[in-house]
Image: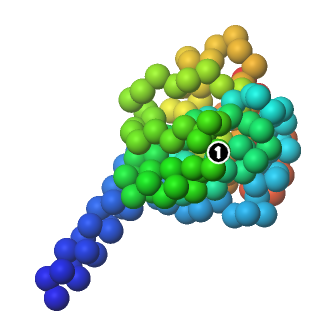
Amino acid sequence: MDWLMLTLAAVVLLFGFVVLFGAPFLPTLKKQLPGIFDLLDLKPGQTLLELGCGDGRVLRYAASLGIKSVGYELNPVLVIVARLRTFKYRRQVRVVWGNYWTVKWPQTDGIFVFLLDRYMSRLDKNIVRTYSGKNVKLVSLAFKIPGKKYTKKRGALFLYDY
């Protein structure tokens, strides 16, 4: 019984603490992937930044389109899963274990996020500060940036131009 409690505690710790930094793991649905990339309109060779890349499915889809990508993930278990799922595309995909709020973001053409509502203003400020004067697009799943008008909407996906 002790091993069960220890295992349960480890799972809760690994998957629950990320709520303090962005959002819990909830995989992007396969049917949402084409919409994300239709809105971002990235071309082969361009770069996607995914903040909270989870199991790597968005990164893998991007790579299948010829898009380079960098994904940040805080949960070490999901980092391993994402790296395994994107191994075939290892020349195009980089999965970084770490807190995306505390690192310098790489140059990018598009950003995809599924963050909780309370982090959207902070995200907006970081994008403005990091990519000021550059043409960067953001697609957010489910949550809007307060006070900012989205350019397009497709279902639960919101496109913002910076």
Is the N terminus in the top left, top right, bottom left or bottom right quadrant?
bottom left
> Quick check: 9 above or below 5?
above
The residue lying at 59 percent from left, 42 percent from top is 90
Whole-percent x and y of residue 137? Answer: 74, 30
Which one is nearer the viewer's eye here, 149 or 162?
162
Describe residue 77's horizontal placement relative to residue 5 as left or right.
right
Describe residue 27's horizontal placement relative to residue 148 as left or right.
left
* Badge 1 amino acid: Tyr
The image shows a total of numbered marks equal to 1
> Quick check: 37 above or below 100?
below
Whole-percent x and y of residue 35? Answer: 82, 51
The residue lying at 72 percent from left, 44 percent from top is 62
Q: Which residue reaches farthest left? A: 2
User: Mark 1 highlights which residue?
Assistant: 89
Whole-percent x and y of residue 85? Answer: 57, 56
Q: Secondary structure at mark 1?
A: helix
Q: Which residue reaches farthest bottom? A: 1
